[in-house]
Image: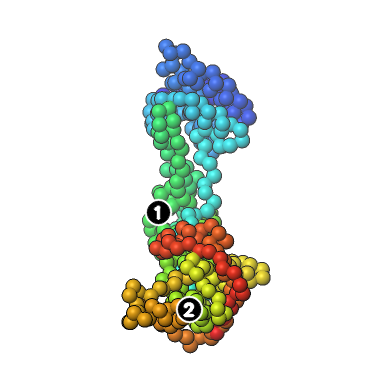
Amino acid sequence: MDTDLYEILGLDSSATAAEIKKAYRKLALQYHPDKAAEGEREESELKFKEISSAYEILSDEAKRDAYDNRGSYHDYSQGGHGSDTPNDYGPQDFFNFFNGMNGSVPQGQAPQRSAKTENAELDVQVSLEDLFKGKTIKITSARNIICDKCHGTGAKSHAKTKTCSICAGKGSVEKIVRVGPGMVSRHYSDCVNCKATGKIFRTKDKCKKCDGNALVEETKILEFVVKKGSKNGETVVLNGESDEALNKKAGDVILTVLEKPHDTFARKGDDLFYNLKITLTEALCGFSKVVLKHLDGRSLKITTPKGKVLRPGHVLKVPKEGMPIKDSYFGGRGDLYILLDIEFPQDNWFLEKNDLDRMSDLLPETLFSKRPKLEAVDAATQEVDFVVIKESELPDIIEEEYEDHGNEQYYEQYGGSEPQCQAQ
């Protein structure tokens, strides 16, 4: 039926936006179903919907102009445009209707469309060596950009266009969805009919370059700089490299760094951990040898003083040989912890019984167990300093880390002078 919207709100056609808003608020409070008696609830619901629908038209400048020119209005309470709105009203609806009156979007009026397209996200696995030294990752990207021929309209330069009837020229459409008893949610999305431009044109007038789609595909190489010391889960963001769209800012491309497990080192924060096997002779008499190849290719050599005893559970701490500290002004580094695993002789290691007597005077120089020998590598070998600590001095995460690696040993401190560690 045809109904005068101004009459529904008790106004005349010359009413200002402020007067329309004030009248709607007053009537909505008066006729909201939650405030009605049980026997009057159905009538209040119909009246409340009629008031809300009238306000939806008159509070929107474009819709009001169209209504004033047409001079009639279809009763939303009988179906049609408002038929998606549930008939159930609850406390949340009451809150939503008036929460929007404090300077936010009025009921029924679409909010401003998102000013940015969606971000593009991708994950890349990176080795510990690359995180130690830093790495630039290059990825081929294909995205949509605004057609430079039609400037995003999808039409020829002199094509005649008209306002899209689906979105009324706004470029977006609204959908009301029931999300629970007495609760609704409003969703706004780009209008597919006009491709969010608000205008439509004849098929023969479409842009030949983009075939009327307003967008064309662009392929380019994106470079992501992963800084030294970057950690697992950190992101690298390239601003404005996602898809483009008319009247929107291009979103970002976000790369998430995923650290690959390493065969030799374990990492916790900025510190590195390494398991080193030594013989009983080396533990008792000391040693001087290359013990590991670092992540940057250097060979680290450790020299322990003769007579210095390394006991089961000891840890060698090499300061500033851990991971680089990301964005450190002075080039700071974490520490390297070398966990010692002392190999003891096998049972019945002696060849003759008098070997047991000789044991008190001379310890075996070699072990019967076979193990690969770590040879010096071609890269420069550097000798580094270290200190011996006990388990209580380790970072809190050491127990967790080495449970994962099957190492259940615990560490004690020994006294005396400190061995020296060299990288050559």
Work out whether residue 274 can be spotted. Answer: no
Question: For the point 52% across and 83% down, which residue is it?
Answer: 288
Picture coordinates of residue 231 (x, y %)? 52, 63
Nearest to the observer: residue 289 or residue 86: 289
What is the crowding at mark 1: few (fewer than 14 residues within 10 Å), some, or many (at least 20)? few
Outermost residue on the right side: it is: 330
Question: For the point 41% across and 25% down, which residue is it?
Answer: 88
What is the crowding at mark 2: few (fewer than 14 residues within 10 Å), some, or many (at least 20)? many
**Label ID, residue 122:** none
Secondary structure of the residue carrying numbered label 1: loop
Q: First in sequence: mark 1 or mark 2?
A: 1
Secondary structure of the residue carrying numbered label 2: helix
Q: Is residue 100 left or right of residue 364?
A: right
Work out whether residue 214 can be spotted. Answer: yes
Name the amino acid, label 1. Arg
Outermost residue on the bottom side: it is: 378
Nearest to the observer: residue 227 or residue 394: 394
Question: For the point 38% across and 56% down, which residue is it?
Answer: 203
Picture coordinates of residue 374 (x, y %)? 43, 82
Q: Is residue 343 left or right of residue 94?
A: left
Question: For the point 43% across and 67% down, which residue is it?
Answer: 260
From the image, tell me which residue sits under label 2. Answer: 282
From the image, tell me which residue sits under label 1. Answer: 202
Q: Quadrant of the C terminus?
A: bottom right
Q: Is residue 122 left or right of residue 288?
A: left
Picture coordinates of residue 345 (x, y %)? 38, 75
Picture coordinates of residue 267 (x, y %)? 49, 65
Mark nearest the camera among 1 and 2 is: 2
| Residue 123, image quadrant | bottom left
Q: Quadrant of the N terminus?
A: top left
Nearest to the observer: residue 205 or residue 184: 184
Name the amino acid, label 2. Glu
